[in-house]
Amino acid sequence: MKLSQFTLAPPGTFDQSSIQVTEALKDVYTHLRDSVKPDATLSTALADFIFVPLSYLLKQPNLSDPQIELLLKVLTILIRHCWSPAGTIPYVLAKQLFPLITFLTGGGPNADNKSEIDVKSDELKLAGSETLQVFFKSLSKQKGAKIYDFFSNVETLPALGHAVTVLLHFCEHGKSIELQLQAIRTLCTLYFDLIADGEILSYILPGNVSSLAKVIAAPGLKTHYTVLVEAIELLGKLLVLVYNDADLKTKVKELESIEDIMDSSEMDIITIEEADFKKVHRTNKWLK
């Protein structure tokens, strides 16, 4: 590939500002986009071959937004067509790709400073959100085929928190409707197709409620109606999953008299069966 001439060059000779590097990336992306059929499954060997020069490129500092955007678009194609079928993406590779994609999309995991996210172009953010959604779909296929359950391992949880923070920021502060919608849809894929576990999602529920409520309650015509509808649907499905009565084995206290009503608070009427060892976080204390 032409890209290899730049990425595999001797140390100290790589020039990330070169228009030729951007053009070489664009050539790779457009060739893959125009050549690969939507439903095609390609060899993982092809993905490995293409990813080698990309991995060298990723080690270079100060890549431009257009270059990172093209990198993410190439990764999207590789994941969708090479690393999506069950058994094609090893856990070790997935563990490396997840924080990498999130970092390229939204910068480092700094909860107090969002300037690193805000300076990135909306085109890059959109490309990264799409890459994350395709990645989550691939992980869902691995889980469905019982290859591995990515988020059952606690070492993946910090990266999960970072990705959710970035996507919620796009939902709330995205400058384009397309970016806001893509961020919401990527979260839906993550929450309902991949994780689908109210216990895990209960840990990140407060941040989701806070961000989505701001999107929904934005004054005037600030939020487009399509974003508003999908944000409400996401929040509703998330609350139903986390507060699922059957999963929590909730019990409702029977009130036999007015005195019982007067003596009981709303929090005492409904309780959670805590005998299930799987519910470490969703306890009666959490419910109150």
Image (tube, rainbow, N blue to C red):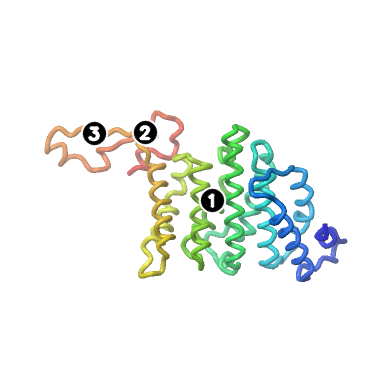
**How far apart, in angstroms, are the residues tagged by discs 2 and 3?**
16 Å
**Secondary element type, mark 3:** loop
Q: For mark 1, does the 10 Å Cα neighbourhood hold few (<14), some (14 to 19), or many (20 or more) residues?
A: few
**Badge 3 density bin: few <14, some 14–19, many ≥20, Cα 10 Å:** few
Give the residue at x 36% y 33%. Answer: 246
Residue 279, by quadrant, is top left
Residue at the limit of the structure toward the top, as seen here: 275
Question: Can you tell which mark lies on residue 246?
Answer: 2
* SS for callout 1: helix
In the image, is residue 155 above or below residue 229?
above
Q: Which numbered disc covers residue 273?
A: none
Using the numbered discs, state the Cα–Cα distance from disc 3 to disc 1 in whole angstroms. Answer: 36 Å
Which of pointers 2 and 3 lies earlier in the amino acid sequence?
A: 2
Mark 1 and mark 3 in contact (Cβ < 8 Å)?
Answer: no
- Residue 143 in picture, x, y percent from top left: 58, 36
Residue 123 falls left or right of residue 268: right
Does the residue at mark 2 contact the one at mark 3 (Cβ under 8 Å)?
no
Q: Residue 234 location, x and y as percent?
A: 43, 51
- Horizontally, residue 181 falls left or right of residue 262, namely right
Q: CB under 8 Å between callouts 1 and 2?
A: no
User: How many marks on residues?
Assistant: 3
Mark 2 lies on a secondary structure that is helix
Q: Residue at x 54, y 58 (%)?
A: 166
- The residue singled out by tag 3 in the image is 253
Residue 34 occupies quadrant: bottom right
| Residue pictured at 74% horizontal, 47% vertical | 47
Residue type at numbered disc 3: Lys
Q: Is residue 25 above or below residue 100?
A: below
**Residue 161's disc number:** 1
Task: Give the quadrant of the C terminus.
Answer: top left
In-image side of 138 versus 254 (left or right) = right
